[in-house]
Amino acid sequence: MRVIRNNYANALLLLLISALTVLNSGCDYMRKVIAKDKINQGAILYNQGRMKEAQEFFKEAKETDTTNPIAFLYYGATLVKDYKTLAGDERTKVANQALDVYKQALELAGNNCATRDNAISYISTIYDDLANVEENRNWLLKRADPNGPCPAKKEIQATTLYSIAVKYWTCSYDQTTRYQDKTAIARDPFHYRNMDYPDALPDKRKAEECVTKGLEYIEKALSVDNEYVDAMFYKGLLYRERQKMTKEEPKRKELNAMAQKIADEASALQKKKEAAAQQQATPQG
């Protein structure tokens, strides 16, 4: 009799566990449906420019279904809109909130490559807006990683590496421009900048480091796409930066020739591509 009772109790327990599992599964399903509906309603409002109302729907969606990365992406987008209208500490605070939201979206994305790319792109942009150069660069490189969970396509690799190189060029250009001679600029836009006295040496070292890193990333971009015209032009401009910081005339002439050669090759390639595109677009008789 005891055996029968035990078997009955075990069966009842299994039935209860099964019922609870079904109930929980049903609740999870309902939460996902409700969250999806809130995302859809928020998207409509977002497209109408009603940001605050959309933000509430997205916030509720991510709280209803904490496993849905799309809810986090949309909510993050509204926070980005918010901080771009702010200034000072409040701007930084909301930008950091957006960063946290996008990093949560990335964690939830798994192997969904579109969601991962969206999240990483926003994260790198937010760091750029916060003037955090190092983190911006780190996240750009994550996006361009050919060996990550979602290997980057060659176009994304090349454009990302190029954009990093351009930032390094800007870093050097900002320094050398401060030392330009306004009387010489019309005669020679790449004239020697006197940055060799003690007070200017830190600026020169910074500019030199930026040129070196810029050329490193430009070469990486060109190794992915050796016909990347914009990258070729900036390679020449980086050599121009070196020319500006060089005093010895023979070396200046050498750098001038290198930069001009690269610019000519880039121009020729650009014309070739434009002609090919025009020919392809012309109807064949």
Image: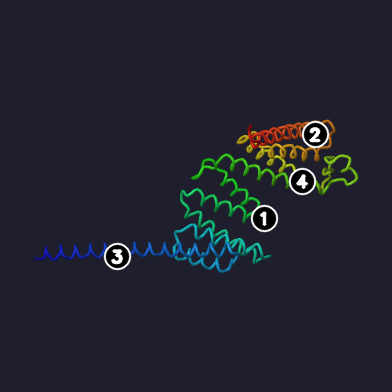
Indicate the quadrant where residue 155 lies.
top right
- Amino acid type indicated by mark 1: Ala
The span from disc 2 to disc 3 (Cα, nearest Å) is 77 Å
Task: List x then y, in percent, for residue 82.
Answer: 62, 64
Disc 1 versus disc 2: distance between alpha carbons? Answer: 33 Å
Q: CA distance from mark 3 to mark 4?
A: 66 Å
Residue tagged 1 = 131
Residue furthest front in the image: 285
Name the amino acid type tagged 4.
Tyr
Q: Position of residue 148 (x, y in %)?
A: 51, 44
Q: Nearer the viewer, residue 196 or 147?
A: 147
In three-dimensional space, the C-alpha distance between marks 4 and 2, rounded to whole angstroms, equals 16 Å
Examine the image and state in which quarter residue 275 appears.
top right
Q: Earlier in the sequence, mark 4 or mark 2?
A: 4
Earlier residue among tags 3 and 4: 3
Mark 1 or mark 3, whichever is nearer to me:
3
Which mark is drawn over residue 256?
Answer: 2
Instruction: Please give the residue where the numbered disc 3 appears in the rendered image.
Output: 20
